[in-house]
């Protein structure tokens, strides 16, 4: 995971903020789907959870605010 974040040239502070946010999300919700709105696999998983009436939180990565990379 570190190499993925570092390949985007995020500052150490931005990386730490992102990791803290992810840790908070996954510790506060039993099931989290990190998704993109156009991903067919993600949409199918969300549909399945809805059909099962399962409680989950979807984080739409393509709708998150992206930091500017200099």
Image (cartoon, rainbow, N blue to C red):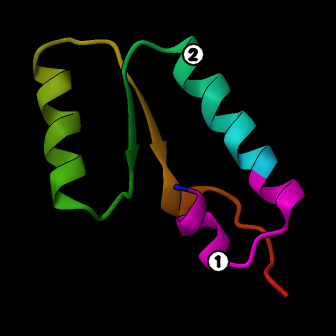
- Residue at left 41%, top 12%? 30
| Dot 1 alpha-carbon crowd within 10 angstroms: few under 14, some 14 to 19, many 20 or more | few
| Marks 2 and 1, the one that precedes in the sequence | 1
Question: SS of the residue at dot 1?
Answer: loop
Q: Which stretch appears magenta?
A: 2-15
- Residue at left 59%, top 26%? 25
Describe residue 62's horizontal placement relative to residue 30 as left or right. Answer: right
Tag of residue 27: 2
- Residue at left 74%, top 35%? 20
Which one is nearer the viewer's eye here, 31 or 62?
A: 31
Describe residue 46's horizontal placement relative to residue 36 as left or right. Answer: left
Describe residue 14's horizontal placement relative to residue 34 as left or right. Answer: right
What residue sits right under mark 1 in the picture?
Answer: 8
Task: Give me the C-alpha separation between circle 2 and circle 1.
Answer: 25 Å
Q: Is residue 59 above or below residue 5?
A: above
Q: Position of residue 17 (x, y in %)?
A: 80, 45
Q: Position of residue 23 (x, y in %)?
A: 63, 28
Q: Position of residue 70 (x, y in %)?
A: 85, 88
Q: Is residue 65 above or below residue 33?
A: below
- Res 36 → quadrant: bottom left
Look at the image and say whether residue 11 sits in the magenta stretch: yes
* Dominant SS type (magenta): helix
Q: Position of residue 9 (x, y in %)?
A: 73, 78
């Amino acid at each position: 995971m570190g190499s993925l974040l570092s390949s985007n040239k995020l500052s150490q502070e931005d990386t730490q903020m992102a990791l803290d946010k992810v840790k908070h999300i996954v510790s506060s919700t039993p099931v989290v789907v990190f998704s993109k709105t156009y991903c067919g696999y993600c949409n199918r998983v969300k549909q399945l959870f809805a059909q099962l009436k399962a409680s989950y939180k979807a984080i739409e990565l393509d709708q998150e605010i992206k930091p500017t990379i200099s």
